[in-house]
Amino acid sequence: MQRYRIAVIAGDGIGREVIPAGKAVLEAAVAGSAELVWTDLPWGSDYYRETGAMMPADGIETLKGFDAIYLGAVGDPPHIPDHVTLWGLMLPIRKALDMHVNVRPIRLLPGITGPLRDKGPADIDMIFVRENTEGEYAGVGGRIHVGTPYEVALQTAVFSRFNVERVVRYAFELARTRRRHLTSVTKSNAQQYSMVFWDEVVAAVAADYPDVEVQSLLVDAAAALMVRAPERFDVVVASNLFADILTDLGGALMGSLGLAPSANLTADPALPSLFEPIHGSAPDIAGRGVANPLGAIWAGAMMLEHLGEADAAARVMRAIEATTAEGTTLTPDLGGTASTDQVAERVIAHLSA
Ligand code: GGG
């Protein structure tokens, strides 16, 4: 039987509620055909309070020993500043393990009516390919004259040809497996260096994909069009910041941010990729057992698919869809009264149906 070593970083807030729910569903999905060997890593804000760091100094080396990483959420505002938690754990992991793309499906699940009442599952079905290691999150910048009236803060966005090209190429390849339509999102009218460069790379790579139609949108127009006509999007490629923002909008279009999954894929086959729901730690509802686990479960399905367990992954997806279509066991964000665990149990029940 195939064994997979999975590092689990439940992290903070509702991450600690949705990840156990996700583990239970994935265990049930592979039962009898594969073994998931979980290693729970107690990293995150509590670890920070105890040690002064979000993860151990050798944390990245530890992660290299696994087949995949399953992550919940990171952040404990207002107790620890968000930039400390994000830069202490998630962003260094993405960079060190060369997780060059962040794949984020945005689609309406059966039975869920999002805020766009006249749009159904055929209209809202897109996948974002988010550049995941540089851009506005490159970590380049600084502050001078701190605390004086002349203080200056710089945050430099970094776009390298090597990286943009491989991310854009990934998006074109993905478009070929779908409706052969790619939207590239920039702000190249205002950002005349980085985003004009991005447009040039897209145009150069597009020459290798004459069968894929390309639409270029400014990020403000893209945000409006996602609400007005989401059916005009299939695969979307965008910078780290723009895709981060637009996928939260996408989560809202799905009916809840709690539904949206993501896969941080490494370019190095010897390294693990990381799978997480896109939502954060949600301190406002943490500890109440009502967080929506479906985004974490869906991220788990993406992990199974990535590990080569396509059958189990498809069964998890069908069970998620059966749960939302049925509509009797949903968390409060979707208008229901069920707990996190009850939703996971319902998904497990649908696995064997
Ligand atoms: N599920 C992981 C999480 O905590 N996401 C919230 C967040 O702020 N993410 C930032 C990012 O994806 O770059």
Image: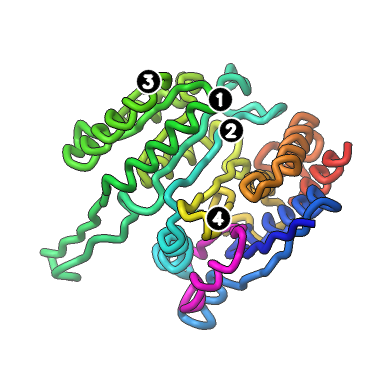
Secondary structure of the residue carrying tag 4 is strand
**Badge 2 residue CB within 8 Å of ligand 1:** no
Mark 4 or mark 2: whose residue is earlier in sequence: 2
Q: Residue at x 16, y 61 (%)?
A: 152
**Mark 4 surroundings: few (<14), some (14-19) or many (≥20) residues within 10 A:** many
Q: Is residue 56 magenta?
A: yes
Q: Nearer the viewer, mark 1 or mark 4?
A: 4
Mark 1 or mark 4: whose residue is earlier in sequence: 1
Whether pointer 1 and pointer 3 mark residues with C-beta atoms closer than 8 Å, the reply is: no
Q: Could you say which is closer to the camera, residue 198 or residue 252? A: 198
Tell me where residue 2 appears, x and y as whole percent.
75, 56
Mark 1 or mark 2: whose residue is earlier in sequence: 1
Q: Residue at x 23, y 61 (%)?
A: 141
Q: Residue at x 31, y 56 (%)?
A: 138
Q: Which labelled disc corresponds to residue 254?
A: 2
Residue 82, can we see it? no
Residue 223, can we see it? yes
Instruction: Find disc 3 in the rendering and name its residue.
Output: 210
Q: Which residues are magenta?
A: 53-78
Q: Nearer the viewer, mark 2 or mark 3?
A: 3
Would residue 223 be found to the left or right of residue 339 on screen?
left
Instruction: Find disc 1 in the rendering and name its residue.
Output: 124
**Badge 4 residue CB within 8 Å of ligand 1:** no
Tell me where residue 179 appears, x and y as whole percent.
52, 21
Tell me where residue 6 appears, x and y as whole percent.
65, 62
Q: Is residue 141 above or below residue 131?
A: below
Q: CA distance from mark 2 to mark 3?
A: 31 Å
Disc 2 residue type (three-letter): Met
Instruction: Find disc 4 in the rendering and name its residue.
Output: 274
